[in-house]
Image (cartoon, grey):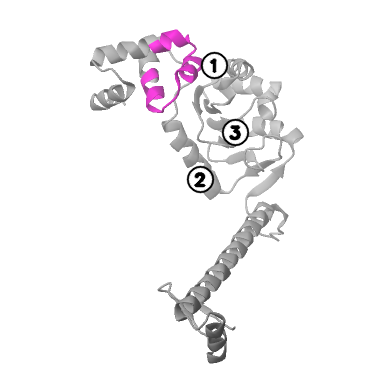
């Protein structure tokens, strides 16, 4: 049998079968034309399925090649991206921080990277005391362990701190001058990239601002506790994480939630969310 399939813009599939093959298939199926058509359709569906798998494999290969783009020779073109080895990254972070009036950074871990460098910490504190605006977003997994919480507590006083699960890699934006980020997304042990391309810097800055706006603060003043509690509830966090985040007991969290429910005369958290939204508190 010989058959061919042509895919057109209307997604219709045209089957072309020779008279010889048609008669052969008709004889093999006792001359049943319905059986013949079903066989042809089944064969073409199988062929299309195989082709889709091949295209998927090709797409995966393209993704691998994209990940290896750092091997590409850009010639004389300055793309504004260069490698930073780990032992040089800390000193570059300090140098860049000395040149700008604001630093925004995302931290996944405090076990490796420039966050572990004592000199970076000391100079960051000095810059913060001198008026430099410093903002840090910690991944919430970092705050879920006692060790991570202690490390974050050690950063208290260095600017503003918020937590989020919406960013899965580390980077720091040094004003409009530069970005330093991990060369491999989310892998804290990988090398660093320093970016000076203005368009890429603007992308990282916009990314940070978008997440910052919807992330709750880590250190909560007493007069801001209820507002923070409501925001964490609206984000769907569990009571245990809210307690760790706010630095209060789990019983206190539940008691304050119960108090809000009583104030609004509701019996479920869903009803509480609706009431808070209607009251413009969410």
Q: Which residue is mark 3?
A: 99
Q: Which residue is mark 2?
A: 203
Instruction: Indicate left or right for 267 with 123 as reference.
Output: left
In this rendering, the label closer to the viewer, 3 or 1: 1
Give the residue drawn at x 37%, y 9%.
255
Q: How busy is the neighbourhood of tag 1: few (under 14 within 10 Å), some, or many (20 plus)?
A: few
Give the residue drawn at x 52%, y 84%.
26
Quarter of the picture containing the C terminus is: top left
Q: How busy is the neighbourhood of tag 3: few (under 14 within 10 Å), some, or many (20 plus)?
A: few
Give the residue drawn at x 31%, y 10%.
259
Closer to the camera in the image, 101 or 257: 257
Q: Is residue 174 above or below residue 257?
A: below
Q: Secondary structure at mark 2?
A: helix
Magenta includes 123? no
Which stretch is magenta?
A: 229-254
The disc placed on residue 120 is none
Cβ–Cβ under 8 Å for marks 2 and 1? no
Cβ–Cβ under 8 Å for marks 2 and 3? no
Q: Which residue is mark 1?
A: 157
Majority SS type along the magenta span: helix
> Which residue in the rendered view is the most extreme toward the right?
87
* Sequence-first disc among 3 and 1: 3
Quarter of the picture containing the N terminus is: bottom right
Q: Residue 185's spot in the image, x, y percent?
A: 62, 42
């Amino acid at each position: 049998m010989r058959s061919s399939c042509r895919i057109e813009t209307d997604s219709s599939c045209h089957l072309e079968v020779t008279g010889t093959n048609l008669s052969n298939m008709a004889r093999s199926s006792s001359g049943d034309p319905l059986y013949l058509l079903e066989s042809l359709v089944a064969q073409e569906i199988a062929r299309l399925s195989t082709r889709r798998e091949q295209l998927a494999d090709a797409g995966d290969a393209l993704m691998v090649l994209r990940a290896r783009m750092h091997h590409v020779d850009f010639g004389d073109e300055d793309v504004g991206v260069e490698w930073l080895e780990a032992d040089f990254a800390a000193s570059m972070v300090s140098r860049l921080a000395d040149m700008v009036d604001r630093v925004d950074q995302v931290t996944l871990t405090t076990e490796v990277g420039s966050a572990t460098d004592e000199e970076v910490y000391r100079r960051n504190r000095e810059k913060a005391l001198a008026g430099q605006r410093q903002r840090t977003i910690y991944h919430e997994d970092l705050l879920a362990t006692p060790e991570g919480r202690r490390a974050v507590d050690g950063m208290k006083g260095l600017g503003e701190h918020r937590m989020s699960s919406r960013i899965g890699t580390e980077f720091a934006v040094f004003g409009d001058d530069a970005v330093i980020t991990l060369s491999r997304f989310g892998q804290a042990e990988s090398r660093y990239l320093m970016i000076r391309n203005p368009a890429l810097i603007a992308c990282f800055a916009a990314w940070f601002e978008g997440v910052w706006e919807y992330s709750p603060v880590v250190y909560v003043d007493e007069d801001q506790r209820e507002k923070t509690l409501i925001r964490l509830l609206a984000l769907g966090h569990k009571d245990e994480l809210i307690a760790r985040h706010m630095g209060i007991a789990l019983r206190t969290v539940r008691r304050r939630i119960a108090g809000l429910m009583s104030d609004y005369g509701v019996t479920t958290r869903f009803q509480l969310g609706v009431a808070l939204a209607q009251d413009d508190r969410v």
